[in-house]
Image: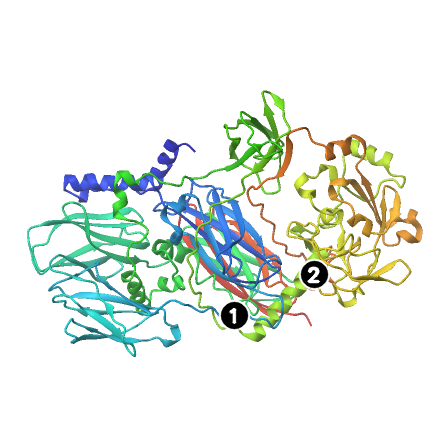
Amino acid sequence: MKRNQILTVSFLICCTINFSFAQNDDFQDWLKDFQSYQTELPTEKVFLHLDKSEYTIGETIWMKSYLVAGAGHIPSPFSQNVYVELINQKDEVAKRLTLRSEEGLAKASLALTRELQPGFYYLRAYTNWMKNQGEEFFFKKKIKVHSLVVNEVIAKETSDQAVDLQFFPEGGELVNGVTSQVAFEVTGINESKFPISGKVFDKNQKEIIAFTTKHEGRGVFAMLPSGDGYYAQLEGSDTRYDLPKVRPEGVTLSVTEQTSDYMGVALKTATPSAENYFLMVHTRGYVTYASEITVRNEKNLLKIDKSNLPHGIAHLTLFDQDFDPVAERLIFNYSTPEIKIDISTSDPQYASRDLATINLKVTDKKGNPVQGSFSLSAYDSKLVQNDQFDYNISANLLLSSDLGGHIKNPSQYLKQDETSKENTDLLMMVNGWRRFKWSSLNLDKRQPQYAFEQSLTLEGVMTRNGGKAFKNGRVFLLNQEENGNNKSSRFVEADLDGNFAFENLVYYDTTELTLQGFQKKKARDIQFNINKDFEVIPNSKFLAAPAQDNPDRLRAMKESVITSIRIDSTYRKENGVIYLDDVYVTASKREEKYRTLNSQYGKGEAYLNFDNLSFEEKNGRDPFTVMLGRLAGFSLSGASGGNSGLSSQGNSGGPGGGSIGSDGSLGAGAVRSSSNGAGNFTDMSTANDPIFRRPQLRPGPFQGGPLILIDNVPVPYSAVYDLRATEIDYVEVYKSASAAMFGVNGFNGAMAFYTLKGDKLKKAMSLKPGMRIITGNGYHAAREFYAPKYDESNKEQFIPDERSTIFWAPMITTDSEGKAQVEFYTHDKNSNVFIDVQGISKTGFTGVGSARFAIRRNL
């Protein structure tokens, strides 16, 4: 999007200011400049809704990204690249995803693979544009990742933060002779020691006032400063903490009362004068009050209407005649939820494997239907600790995202009882307005360092085989799948150092990209060094203070996850590929003829053409792994302990043994096998680890392996592990009647692999000079959440179901009546299911909803 287009859209999302209440011409000009700033530099925010906040190694984090912009929190029309990072306790980015945000929305799945260590992790999300305001305004969520060792517990976090005591006079400063409310905050002390008390002394060590914390280390007291040199001490400590310096004269700003209709504001001074000041109230840049004020009395009271004040943090700022801020105060304006999400279930209690129907109805404050996008997580509350509801989208966008840093359980400040309101006001008093700095209104400071991103850039260097830069070259890029088209191509010129960059690309991380180097219109033998680096942004840490782990719950959760991982890797999905229902893969007429000519056994019931798969889908993988999820009924089992017997036809390890990596490739690892002399090999090492699997065409732990053929020659299945998927042309699968031709050897079916030959082999194994196929570092392609269907046609009835996240639906859209419906089958356990729904309307209003139902096993 070009700059002028961005400014046009930006103007539309910034609420228009009515300057009629500001009579001073200079003030009106200043306010217009303020609005211009909001238009040119709109704020973006990201919120991630997760399926839960506690995981184990081997699970997947399911998430949805909500990207909003401007005062109205509308789905952002600016950035389309959202970066999600998983950061470990060493401040290393362990995993990183680039999401493609469409109309402010994106879904993602992040696999917690084996190389990760158990412990606390930070999940961080941001756009390139958000880097202009600093890391403290990124979305950040702390999660637990447990090991699969049942009795292993994550060590509690400790803080090396020193005890500190800070003071925050209301309005910003203490003024001599003016009574002020002074908020304070104690940090670096374990919460179990709160409340904690202390005393304030003057410079003559005379006690002035005692104080005690009220909520999360915060409190407030009133004092009349006279002179300077005030300090405080906490009980049991000799450490002195200085209060802010006292100004000899000036004006203080305080909020005296708040109702749903108005707020009372007091401007106080010990030295009244005819000097004029300017008071402005805005929420996220939307101005609702602006007036010129003369402070003629020691106490000047104002009554400010709140009817047009949006929900969220309002910023009251008092400026002098040069429009420099002299006092400021934050308040949090919130009454009732902007939108209401009603959740109803077809039954308050379901049997195991019942179909649960969840109905959503979303309305605004007046009961009108609301259209929007929502995400739903249904999880077993007996197994999972989940604080997603405490850190929900409304609390994030309205409160914590504008304060920066970590706010513990921000949803507590949306409650409307008097105690919660007092605690919220304490939070406002100890936080200055951190997202916006008045000095940035200066025109010289309006040039952002980081731009909006709406596509990808592929950068690299052309070099000769010896490593020297290739000068005056051209690079040709072929993208097999861009914007849904089959192919797209383009050229770009390299500079004198061989650097090149392709901009405005849209491709996903499964895409195959082909690069070709040229010089003077001739293809050259060139090497390409692709830049895959990204800016590493320091991570600001915080203590999550999670709830105490219950050993019984934790053990039950881990045992459930271990069972689910074994089941999924055997029957349903492997490396992110979803197990298919029994639907056969069909071929074109040309392929049918080709199959008939090559196979002496004829066509089978199922067929997979490897040649039609992308290079990325095959590269570094064995044929069996590629087949998972792509051929009806095919699965890998064995070496899983229990009743499977650990017996397999052939060598279960393949060449040297190995493990399936995060990309599905076979990694290194030792596998000890022994033979009984009859051609059957027994795995001696992987009884509890789903690594090497025997192929099966019929689901079930007691099914034998099929007959394996390569180019019409019977072989042990280990021979297939010796092949690369890139060497396979296609595979025929014979089951039922078609397998009868193989006699007793085909009792469990047969699989015939055909390798590439002739022109196909040449095409796969050779590239033109200077040509290189690379795996695109593109947008993240989210997996689909697997949820079994227990209808009459289901063939998985025998498979245990112990999902902790029972269902995840990231892209729910309400209709014109504000309604939507979700259906899923329950699992096997006696449990209580918590449903967490969060989302946003088309107009930027956020909402959350929850419901519960019970599951009771069939007797």
User: Can the viewer see residue 327 in this picture?
Assistant: yes
**Rounded to the nearest whole Å, what is the CA distance between mark 1 and mark 2?**
29 Å
Q: Nearer the viewer, residue 299 or 858?
A: 299
What's the coloring here? rainbow
Q: Which of 751 and 605 is in front in this view?
A: 751
Q: Where is residue 686 in the image (x, y as percent from the top left)?
A: 74, 63
Q: In this view, does 63 lie to the left or right of 846?
A: right
Q: Name the residue under label 2.
A: 567
Identified at 74% across, 65% down, the residue is: 687
Q: Is residue 832 left or right of residue 669?
A: left
Q: In this view, does 219 lie to the left or right of 598?
A: left
What amino acid is found at the position of numbered circle 2 in the picture?
Answer: Ile
- Disc number for residue 155: 1
Graded by Cα atoms within 10 Å as few (under 14), some (14 to 19) or many (20 or more), the crowding at tag 1 reads few
Q: Quadrant of residue 205?
A: bottom left
| Front: mark 1 or 2 | 1
Say above or below: 157 vs 470: below
Give SS at disc 1. Answer: loop
Q: Position of residue 835 (x, y in %)?
A: 52, 61
Give SS at disc 2. Answer: helix
Q: Which of 137 and 410 is in front in this view?
A: 137
- Quarter of the N terminus within the rendering: top left
Q: Is residue 217 left or right of residue 226?
A: right
Q: Earlier in the sequence, mark 1 or mark 2?
A: 1
- Quarter of the C terminus within the rendering: bottom right
